[in-house]
Amino acid sequence: MESTEVLVARHGETYWNRISRWQGSSDIKLNQTGIQQARKLGELLSREKITRIYSSDLQRAVTTATIISEIIGTGPVITDMRLRERGLGKFEGWKSEEVARFLSIPLDQKHILETDELSIENGPEVEPWEKFLKRIWDFMGEISPAGNNGKTLIVAHGGVLRAIEYSLTDKGFDLPVYGNCQFIRLSTDGKNWKIY
């Protein structure tokens, strides 16, 4: 069966990224640094023979995807809300220090909020981890292999990259925190997925 390579990238920087505010599903736009990062990623990916681009429907992802699409010359960006960042409920707009205080996590251990997704499972209105995983993989299951004709790019969010890696490796939550416009490589034959 034919397989296709799928690249999954995080969006460019936003002002909330710059000041370390949790975004979740809040619709925050790219700042100027984020726009520059998207252009650099587009230039890098111009060698990858990408034939289609999907994106979260949040503007920071759509803008990143659109900039890349204009540079590499693919068709229109296809948006899907299932690629949104995990909903963080009441914590959206908060800084890690504020979340740590709310959850009674010592400030010298606030880094676990970035590296252990389940540490925020008990937050108010936070999207359950399993529900987050399900909507991502519901989307991923609909991607058909493009074969040798090209690759697929998905522009989403750091949590989406982490959720995919969580599902395809045995690392548990010992996962990297992806920077803006970093990406991972996957391949699929339409049923099975591999991460490089």
Image (tube, rainbow, N blue to C red):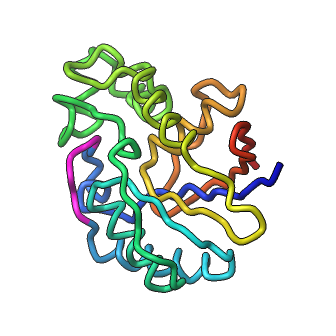
Residue 45 placed where, x, y %? 61, 76
Task: Judge by depth and name the residue closer to the eye, 189 or 10.
Answer: 189
Q: Is residue 135 above or below residue 126?
A: below
Left or right? Give the position of 113 relative to 43: left
* Magenta-highlighted residues: 24-29
**Residue that extends furthest to the right in the rendered view of this protein:** 1
Residue at 53% over, 45% down: 161
Q: Main secondary structure of the magenta part?
A: loop
**78 in the magenta segment:** no
Q: Residue 78: name its quadrant.
A: bottom left
Residue at 38% over, 29% down: 110
Residue at 25% over, 28% down: 99
Residue 151 placed where, x, y %? 66, 66
Residue at 36% over, 20% down: 128
Q: Is residue 17 above or below residue 63?
A: above
Residue 83 placed where, x, y %? 40, 46
Q: Residue 43: name its quadrant.
A: bottom right
Task: Judge by depth and name the residue closer to the eye, 26 or 106.
Answer: 26
Q: Residue 184: name its quadrant.
A: bottom right
Left or right? Give the position of 180 relative to 145: left
Task: Judge by depth and name the residue closer to the eye, 1 or 158.
Answer: 1
